Image (spheres, coloured by chain):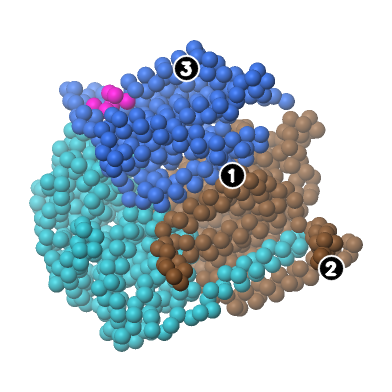
Amino acid sequence: MSIQIFFQHLANAISLGSLYALIAIGYTMVYGILRLINFAHGDIFMIGAYFTFYLVTMFLMPWGVAFIVAAGLTCMFGIAVERVAYRPLRDYPRISVMISAIGASFFIENLAIVIFGGRPKAFPVPDIFGKVIHLGTVSIVSVTFIIPIITLIFLFILLFIINKTKTGMAMRAVSTDYEAARLMAIDVNKIISITFGIGSFLAAVGGIMWGLKYPQLLPLMGLMPGLKCFIAAVVGGIGNIKGAVLGGFILGLSEIMIIAFLPSLTGYRDAFAFILLIIILLVRPSGLLGQSQMEKV
Amino acid sequence: MKKTCTLLACGLLILAVFITGCSKDEGKEAEPEVIKIGVFEPMTGANAAGGAMEIEGVELANKLYPEVLGKKVELVIVDNKSDKVEAANAATRLVDKDKVTAIIGSWGSSFSMAAGPIVQNSQVPTVGASCTNPLVTKGNEYYFRVCFIDPFQGTVMANYAYNELGARKTAIVQEISNDYSVGLAKFYTDAFKALTGDEKAILGVANYNTGDQDFTAQLTNLKQLNPDVIFAPGNYTESALLVKQARELGITIPILGGDTWEAPEFLDIGKAAVEGSVFSTFFTTEVPITQESEKFLEEYRKAYGKEPASVTALGYDAYLVILDAIKRAGSFDRVAIRDAIAETSDFPGAAGIISLDENGDAVKSAVIKQVKDGGFVYLTTVEPIK
Amino acid sequence: MKRKNSVLSFAGVVFCLLLLLLFNKTFDSYKMRIFNLCAIYITLGLSLNLVNGFTGLFSLGHAGFMAVGAYTCALLTLSPANKEMNFFLQPILPFLANTEWPFFPALLVSGLCAAIIGFLIAAPVLRLKDDYLAIATLGFSEIIRVIFTNTQRLTNGALGLKGLPNYTNVWWSWGVAALTIVFMIRLMRGSYGKALKSIREDEIAAEAMGIDVFRHKVISFTISSFFAGIGGALLGHLLGTIDPLMFRFLLTFNILLIVVLGGIGSITGTVIAAIVVTVLMEVLRVLDSSIDFGLFVMKGIPGLRMVIFSALLMAVILFYQRGLMGTNEFSWDSLGKRLRRIKKRGPK
């Protein structure tokens, strides 16, 4: 492999990895608080992308405004999902909540098929995001530069919220001990709603970025990215935001590099993520940056 | 043991109640003035888009030709949910519950294959519109189709690459989980190797899975092989993104594909990147092949206000072939209709002149098209090998 | 009392057999197919319930085991001529080319193959808990599917296999379902079942009571895979054709649905739910086509059926947590009690 081709692969990997990272952050936030795999996260991601599509094509909003409005709407959508599907089950066993999450995801997908239709829609990409930049023999689409920057910006904003604000402190409290937080007069429901809002906002941003890079919308588009980003979050150490970013990059990098060095394995690409997940779970179940927890008796 | 039996009893009782409950609506028999043609297509799930396009064609045909032998033709459209189990259920339902005379469908060869044994056992003639997997009709005397099959299409594209583009080396990107794509890639490979006489004419094969959206790693690998042309059969949903990413990676060589690319979404999603892509298909709006084509085009534009896709024309043809066979058979007997369909020869359909071979596959000409200025432009017609 | 119950049970069995005979005679093939599907879903539902409901391990890998079973059985029973027709792109591996087994041994072997795979997966995966376990089993089933897609010479890849002999009839499907039911009841009554339930309730307490938790989990998982493999094989031979895309997560989800609706941890519930779900799926088909209300015709919306179905499921999850039966089982005594209660309330 020539060095140019290697750099091309590297550029591809970073661009894919940063997208995974962006979505994994939202996943990990929700998990950190609720201890729940939000199966519907991938679907919220899809909804965010569709909202943007309709705002731009039907309501003719300029794309900048549309992005913000769509992210806001998705944020509300996510809070609504939490209210309807998760809140009533707060005190039930985790399996019930997880089934409810799967059910919610299934419901949103089916509803999306009826409302948005099964045919793919072309995501409106503003020209500045679609430009191809040539660096020597390496070609990179401009959106590739933007995604890592956005991912990092959100990473820092989130770290700030969680570590420096009162809401963030409440989030950490809820995450550490739900019952104790309640006793400390923290409005647990409000905190969970906020977390879900932030998570969904990030999912929407992820959806929009995904749309800019892969401009095709389908009702089931959130399925695979949703699973893969969950894996990224687990690899990094679920509940840990920096870990999610790390996990996203590792997943993106390994997906691309395995194919780059072993081209005969291309057909198995979808399995890589799962194999990575299983290896991590067996070797280091708490993830790369996660803390291991003792089981409470 | 006690509980076992009680459980069994309980389950069966409920079942009995259910089944008697849901069979009530069968009391009223359809009036004999109507003959029913079943349509089973994916209306939901991953293949909903393809199903919708075919149904448009069948419905249009039904609107234009609502009667045969003095009886009204009624369509019974059922959803197979892009799922094999559901496809088999849907087909059985058409056969037994709706008592259809013939069946049209389905987009997606695997669903057609699920229906295969059902229509064969109950002797209901079935015509597929765009299921191109050779296995669909093989060994099944009740399944026919109005499209050509993968081997022919693969050969056509190999010839085009070799003769028109002067290509001597090809790279292939195939959708490994899609029978259509794998089949086409295989037949292209065989034909291309035979043409060049070079066993190493295929430089590399990259795979991807249905639903994948990132192909950069596969494409970068192929780029360094320096092929003359890339053959990338697959659904337009993935292919549009694939071609786009190839162009973004600076791959400038021609990219060839199959008939599924002919969908407006391919252009919408790929935009400027898909310019110049070449693919084979069944039918063109620019050079109407038959009088029926013109009629179909005119009516379709009137009804839907857009250009039809090839599979829409094929759905239309599937309906016409059945109607024509009923006319020739002069009866509504399913076996007689089957025999009549099998004898279909030089039938002028909207998507070309249809003759069915001994397997029940259409032998017809292929059309090669190119994407140009945001539209599909007709390049040439390739006659069938008879 | 006991005597009376056994008489009742015996009558129940005879009644069921008669019913089977009756259905076998009177049903057209559409109803027959749904009827058979009910039985297959009972087998699959029970096998998933063993792991998810009785042992309390949340596994989402059922589709993978079904795929293993279905492919094993298909490759063993397909006639050499059919194999040659199917493998027209790439030839089949030579050692499989000429096998043509009768259905029963093939079915057994397919169950065993699935069980072996299940056993191999169980060893590493069962060290995980809850949602990690769920996602890891889901991962394994996806890996199995991806492998089957890529091994063209073994499985024919995406092209799938067709021409599977239609062995699955009422006697096979319902026979297997009945055997599964009997097996599950016996298992749950025995010491193994008690141990599994105690693991579900409190793993640490179970361990303290001297139960080898890991071993029991592995056994439960392996048995579940065995029945999943058999269910998959029956399904393949009912349809006559299989391909890797059949065995997506959605299939696991359908079975999970049955388990949840019936009540996680109830055999009766699973049996009832399997039948209800299968029949309801077909009944709801009405929603996809146009409905004539006499005065106006409501145009069918394709996909509405699935929306309503998933909404129903959500409603059950949210408002009827325990499903149909909770962890209860049917017995004549409880039925009698209920009847008496109704009688007492009686007509006013």
A115 or B188: nearer the viewer: A115
Foreground mark, 1 or 2, reads: 2
Please tell me which residue is depicted at 41% across the width and 76% down the height of the picture.
B100
Horizontal and vertical percent for residue C6?
A: 84, 65
Label 3: which residue? A161
Mark 1 and mark 2 on one chain: yes
Foreground mark, 3 or 2, reads: 3
Residue B130 seen anywhere in this rendered image of the structure: no
Please tell me which residue is depicted at 18% across the width and 65% down the height of the picture.
B297
> What range of the chain is rendered magenta?
A141-147
Q: CA distance from mark 3 to mark 1?
A: 44 Å
Which color has been applied to chain C in this rendered view? Answer: brown
Mark 3 packing: few (<14 Cα in 10 Å), some, or many (20+)?
some
Label 2: which residue? C7
Which color has been applied to chain A in this rendered view? Answer: blue
Label 1: which residue? C118
Q: Quadrant of the N terminus of chain C?
A: bottom right
Which amino acid type corresponds to the residue marked 1 in the rendered image? Gly
Which amino acid type corresponds to the residue marked 2 in the rendered image? Val
Q: CA distance from mark 3 to mark 2?
A: 69 Å
| Residue A142 is covered by the magenta coloring | yes
The chain in cyan: B
Please tell me which residue is depicted at 53% across the width and 60% down the height of the picture.
C281
Please tell me which residue is depicted at 21% across the width and 28% down the height of the picture.
A128
Q: Are marks 3 and 2 in contact (CB under 8 Å)?
A: no
